[in-house]
Image (tube, coloured by chain):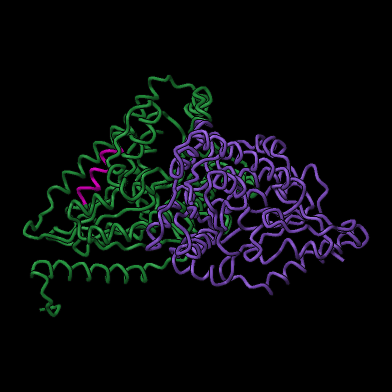
Amino acid sequence: MPVKVGIPRALMYYEYFPLWKAFFNELGVDVLLSAPTTKTILNQGVSACVDEACLPVKLFHGHVLDLKDKVDYIFIPRLKSVSKGEYICPKFCGIPEMIKYSIKDIPPIIDVEINLRNNYNNLYKSFLAVGKLFTNSRYQINTAYNQALKAHYQYKSLLKSGRLPGEILEGKRSPGLKAPDLTIAVIGHVYNIYDSYISMDLLNKLRKQNIKIITPEQIDNRLIENKAETLPKRMFWTFGKRLLGSVLYLIEHEKIDGIIYIMSFGCGIDAFVAELSEIKVRKSGSIPFFLLTLDEHSGDAGVNTRLEAFIDMIIWRKQNEGNIPSHG
Amino acid sequence: MKVTFPHMGNTCIVVKALFDTLDIDFVTPPPCSKRTLEIGTKYAPEFACLPLKLNIGNYIESIEKGADTIVITGGCGPCRFGYYGEVQREILKYLGYNVDFIVLEMPKGNIKEFMARINKLAGGKSVISIVKAVKKATQVSIELDKLDKLCWKTRPREKERGKTDWILKKFHHQVVKVKGADKILDLIYHVREEIEKIELDNTLSPLKIGIVGEIYTIIEPFTNLKIEQMLGNMGIEVDRSLSVSNWIVEHMIKQALHLKKNRPYEKAALPYLCTMIGGHGQETVGNCVMYAKEGYDGIIQMFPLTCMPEIVAESILPSVSDDFDIPILTLIIDELTGEAGYRTRMEAFIDMLYRRKERKLLDNEYVLSGN
């Protein structure tokens, strides 16, 4: 029977799953994903994790619990840095330990360190270390590594086309839009905006109202980089930089009717990036900005009300702008 | 140019020594207070860590006193401190304050830019005189930390309760009035002698508690509810794992000169956390192990809400506590923290520690407390 490796459907799943899956499959290893997020998974995560952690980390604990008794290994890479001179988040560096010391009796964790801060070649070394757990053939690992990178780039280009990770990864069709009424940018970490339970299906709620959505993953990396370069100090969080760079790009170059920033309660990076984004948007003039903070207590109804109000406001604005003075 | 800087415990004395020696005109922000925190909370992002909020409060209170340039140090992550300068600059600019920021760091290892920033601050002083001033200020910092260490020992043992604090209070009052690093050093030596003269009851063997956590929170008395003083006066000897002088020597000077750093905590933390996670996360875990091995009775971890590295440490600490059989209390500080509630928790923690000690002395026999 082939070895089974469990991958939690949380955090960097939305960014790197095709890469990991291709690599393991090529080595003849079965990959088991945890179930899509449900209330039970979230609740289990919340009770296993320390109280102060942010929502996505708590959720990650829940997904690991979901996999615990079903697999031979759990894949929790230590993502220290995925880009030169940058980091991700201290919690990502310490997540294997957080899991190890919070959840008892779990299968062995594959906690290989991915650290490309100084040297990009470390990526191959990390994959080699993982591959050696399953095979002795260097050739097989090399093939798997190349396949994995190929799958990753293919996935990235699919994301650019506007399809959502959930649709690509699960092979669902994306709903076609008629000529959209509005275009709204949804900014946030991948694990917040694309997990439809956590984001309360915000993306589809917008699509159903015939609104075109733009997410940071659809914007060309080079454009984001260029914008991020204009900051007085280089931002050293890869994903924080992506969010802020996208906001800067969008307010200058795209015709958008509003920006929705989704942050999770207790996220250290969002605390800064959301603030900087809001300041930049407010300074740029007239794009409506909506900051939605999610935590484990978020209720659907409250979010719906706020979202409706936001969209109504944009529509009124579009219809009446310039006709009625706002001060009566 | 009137320079100001954020508070962090005794750092204002170190900065004073440095700026006095270099003839830089500066404003010391008023000590952190409820008002400082209120200003900071109002203007800083809601989920920013407490130090950032207090920094903003410090700046605005200093600007009210005439400051127009702000000096802070920087870093390159992954802890949020590295981006403090940028966020604070944007916030102050948005609020309409016209101030200059000098962030003392080497962007992308660019020494030229670093020297330009120093030059902007020190206004044409020679490199030698700057190095001399930094050396003097470092010495002030080392002496101040030695003074702290001495107080941790005398407080629980002094025969006349409150004497140590009284001398320290006088010192803080006097140090503002003296000018120059040499005079500050003289004053510190003088205070040291005075504290050494305090009559001690050496028959006591007080409980020993180690304090670990996020550096700002455990050093700044306003955020840590004066924990050293509070515990000391309850008759407990404390030790703080991080100090300003250590940070200056290890983090700033050795980093700049590429010297080998002294990191005993790394080895101690190895079985639990094998990598640097930013901030002082690894230090917290390592120092807990070291305190446990040195026979401390308990450990208190303190950090501001949403501090990323300390959250990782927090989730590891229960295992350290189990493995070494040492109680660890975690206190999380934010702008709503009330002193009374935390005092009660600390008292309960200490009662528990006394009870454990009593049991150990009596071969694990249970005795009615108070007997």
Residue B143 against residue B308 in the figure, above or below: above
Stretch in magenta: B141-151
**What hue does chain B carry in this figure?**
green
Looking at the magenta stretch, what is its main secondary structure? helix
**Rendered-image quadrant of the C terminus of chain A:** bottom right
Residue B288 falls left or right of residue A324: left
Q: Is residue A54 above or below residue A25?
A: below
The image position of residue A225, as x and y in percent, is 67, 36
| Farthest-out residue, right | A323
Residue A305 highlighted magenta (yes or no): no
Question: Where's residue B173, x and y in %?
Answer: 31, 49
The reply to whether residue B337 is in sight is yes
Q: Nearer the viewer, residue B142 or A96?
A: A96
Task: Give the residue drawn at x 48%, y 21%.
Answer: B124
**The image quarter in which residue B260 lies:** top left
**Which residue is nearer to you in this view: B210 or A202?**
A202
Residue at the image point whose x is 20% and y is 52% from the top: B293
Total numbered labels: 0
- Chain coloured purple in the rendered structure: A
